[in-house]
Amino acid sequence: MTDTLGTQTVEERLGCLQELTKFTENCQKQLNDILDTLGWSPEYDGSAQETMVQCPFDPNHRIPVRSLERHKSSCSLSKMGYSAEEQEGMYDSSVCYEKSNIRSVTMDEATQQQVILKARAAAPLMRMEGVFWQGEYTSQPLDVPQNHKRALCDLTVADRLALYDHVTGELNQQQQEAAANEDLYVDLVAKLKRDEQQGEPKSHLELMAEKRDYKRRRQSYRAKNVHITKKSYTEVIREVIKVHSGELAREWKEESCEEEKEKAEKKEKEQVKEKEEEERGSIRSSKRRRSDDECSESQASHDRSRQRSRKHSPEREDRKRKKRDSGSPDERHHERKKKKKKKKKDEKEKEK
C-alpha cells in the first residue's frame, strides 16, 4: 500500500510541474509579444525612465514631461466642469490662423471681466426700454466659455453683447492698422512692373483713357486750350470764386422764393380765417337781431292784450257772472276748450 501511494504522489507532482511550466511559458510569451508591440526591452534600466511631473491642476496626477501640455488642457477643462463628450467636440482653432491673413482675438478671464465691468458702469442704473441696465450684467468673475452651450448658460444677453462689441472694435482697429501699414510699405513701381509683365489684355475704358492722355500731350491740343493753360493763379482763383458765388446766389434765391411762398400761404390762411370769423359774427348778429325783434313784438302784443283786457274787464265780468248763473257744466267745459284753442293759435301766430 505504501508503494502505491508513493508512486501516485510522484506522478501527481510531475503533472503539476508540467502544467506550471506550460503556464509560465505562455505568460512569458504574452509578455514578450506586448514588449515587442510597445518597443520596450525586457531589461529594466532606471536611467532611461522618463521624468514624471506633477499636474498643476490636480496634485494627485503625475504625468511625463512630453504629455504635460496635452494633459493640462484636458485637466483644466474637466476641473471647469466640461464632460468627456464636450471635450471631444472641442478643438484648438489657433492652428487654422497660423498661415493665413485672418484676424483673430484671444479672450482670457481678466479681459472678459474688464469688458463686462466697463459696459456695466456705462449702463443706466434703472430699467429702461431698449437699453440694458446694470442689473442685467454679471458682477462676479466667470471662466471664459469654451463652447456655445456654456456661453449661453454662464453669460447673460448683455454680457454677450458687450463682448461682441469689444471683439468687433478690436478687429476693426487691426484692419485699420494693417491698411495703414500696407499703404506705407507698398512698392508702387514694382506693382506697376508686375502688372505690365502679366500682359493681360486692356479693357475698352483703359484704351480710351490712354488715347485721351495721348491727345492731351500733343502740341496742337495745348495750343487750342490757351485760355486754360496760360492763365495766372489770380485769374484761376477769381474764376473759382465767381463760380462758387454764383452757386451761393442761386441757393439764396431759391431759399428766398421758398420763404416768400410760405409767407403768402400763411397770409392766405389768415385771410380765410378772418373771413370765416366775419361770417360767423354776421350770422350771430342777425340771430340776435331776430331774437330782439321777436321779444319786442311779444312784449307789444302782451301790452296790447293787457290794455284790451283792462278796457273790457267789466263787460267780461258781467258775462262771466251771467254764464255762471245760467248754463250747464258741459257748456262751460266746452267754452274752456275753445279758449285754450284760441290761446294756442295766438301763440303760434306770434311765433311766426
Image (cartoon, rainbow, N blue to C red):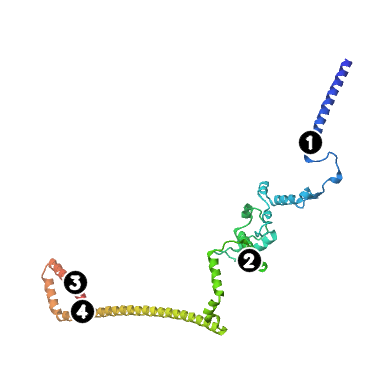
Label 2 belongs to which residue?
192
Q: Identify residue type, mark 1.
A: Asp
User: Quick check: 116 left or right of 278?
Assistant: right
Report x, y in % for residue 238.
53, 84
Q: Earlier in the sequence, mark 2 or mark 3?
A: 2
Q: CA distance from mark 2 to mark 4?
A: 117 Å
The residue nearer to you, when weighing 60 against 103, is 103
Secondary structure at badge 2 equals helix
Q: Identify residue type, mark 4.
A: His
Which residue is the extreme one toward the top?
1
The residue nearer to you, when weighing 246 against 296, is 246
Report x, y in % for residue 220.
53, 77
Q: Is residue 289 above or below residue 193?
A: below
Report x, y in % for residue 235.
54, 84
Specify the quadrant that holds the N terminus.
top right
Label 4 belongs to which residue?
302
Q: Earlier in the sequence, mark 2 or mark 1?
A: 1
User: Quick check: 285 left or right of 100?
Assistant: left
Q: What label does residue 293 carry, if any?
A: none
Report x, y in % for residue 79.
71, 51
Q: What label does residue 344 carry, if any?
A: 3
- Residue found at x 53% / y 68%: 208
Secondary structure at badge 1 equals helix
Nearest-to-viewer mark from 4 and 1: 1
- Residue found at x 78% / y 36%: 33
Label 1 belongs to which residue?
33
Specify the quadrant that holds the C terminus.
bottom left
**Residue 271 position by quadrant:** bottom left
Q: CA distance from mark 3 to mark 1?
A: 139 Å
The residue nearer to you, when weighing 33 against 122, is 33
Q: Earlier in the sequence, mark 2 or mark 4?
A: 2
